Image (spheres, rainbow, N blue to C red):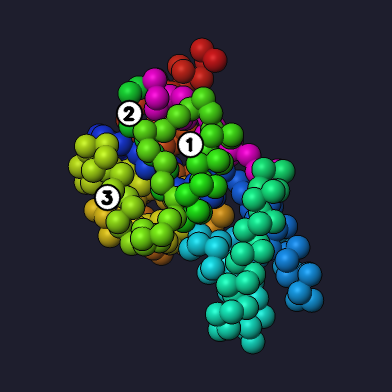
Amino acid sequence: MIGETDRVDAEAVIFDLDGTLLDTLADLAESVNEVLAQEGHAIHPHQAYRMYVGDGVEALIRRALPATEQGDPDVVAGLVTRVRAVYDRRWDRVTRPYDGILELLAWLRARGLPSAVLSNKPHPLTKKCVAKLLVPHSFNAVLGSMPGLPLKPDPTGGLRITTQLGVAPACTLYVGDTDTDMRTAQAAGFVGVGAAWGFRGRQELVDSGANVIVDTPHELAELIGARAAFASHQSDD
């Protein structure tokens, strides 16, 4: 829960995707497990993937592989290609927005507050996820990983978005669920908002220096300072 002194006048809100807007864990886990099983490797329970995801697909594969194979770049590169192919055809089997996300996005749009997505997921797939599962709540910018763009926690992608939106980094909320997201916010000069409903939970967000932590999307509206307006919007739906 947030206190009165935690409220900020935000000019824009940038969201992480996996573990913040969308619960993608099961589809990611099943995709990697399918390829691991084909290679004769041990598969992992879905909950283990909470600690594997967040830093791009290559890091995900390294973390899921046996220690003896994690340092082999050829093995990792081959599995990255195969996992991407599997995930591309099954990414939306059970992936859904978290409770309250669609209402929050509608409220932000009605309020006229610019919003964006910044993800370490490949850019085409990031766009596809947003288009299918977060429509009609469109964003002002959507940016995933692409050649020449460093992965988070490098601030380049986030600062590209704020430049595009014409907003000050210091007045931008960056909402995410991992230490990578909070380090991204710190590097870019954003207000780091920890989404405690996501993959990693509250303690990691505390340890990684989140400026404030919210337990629900409703609390994010409260952080912006208009809880009553958000509640009114929900009642009108």
> Is 101 one of the magenta-colored residues?
yes
Report if residue 205 is visible in the image.
no
Q: Position of residue 88 (x, y in %)?
A: 64, 50
Q: Is residue 69 left or right of residue 197?
A: right
Residue 113 shows up from this direction: yes
**In the image, is 85 to the left or to the right of 59?**
right
Label located before the other in sequence (1 or 2): 2
Towards the viewer: 194 or 71: 71
Give the number of the disc on residue 113: 2
Residue that appears at 32% across and 50% down: 158
The quarter of the rendered structure image containing the C terminus is: top right
Q: Say whether residue 53 is magenta.
A: no
Q: Earlier in the sequence, mark 3 or mark 2?
A: 2
Question: How many residues crowd around disc 1 within 10 Å: few (fewer than 14), some, or many (20 or more)?
Answer: many
Q: Nearer the viewer, residue 33 or 212?
A: 33
Callout 1: SS:
helix
Highlighted range, magenta? 94-110
Categorize mark 3 by other alpha carbons within 10 Å: few (<14), some (14-19), many (20+). some
Q: CA distance from mark 1 to mark 2?
A: 15 Å
In the rendered structure, which disc, 1 or 3, sits on the residue that comes first in sequence?
Answer: 3
Residue 69, quarter of the rendered image: bottom right
Q: Residue at x 59, y 79 (%)?
A: 74
SS of the residue under disc 2: loop
Q: CA distance from mark 1 to mark 3?
A: 24 Å
Residue placed farthest to the top in the image? 236
Amino acid under disc 3: Leu
Residue located beneath label 3 in the image:
159
Question: Which amino acid, mark 2?
Answer: Leu
**Residue bearing the label numbered 1:** 217
**Nearer the viewer's eye, disc 3 or disc 2?**
3
What residue is at 24 percent from the left and 53 percent from the top?
189
In which image quadrant can residue 182 be found? bottom left
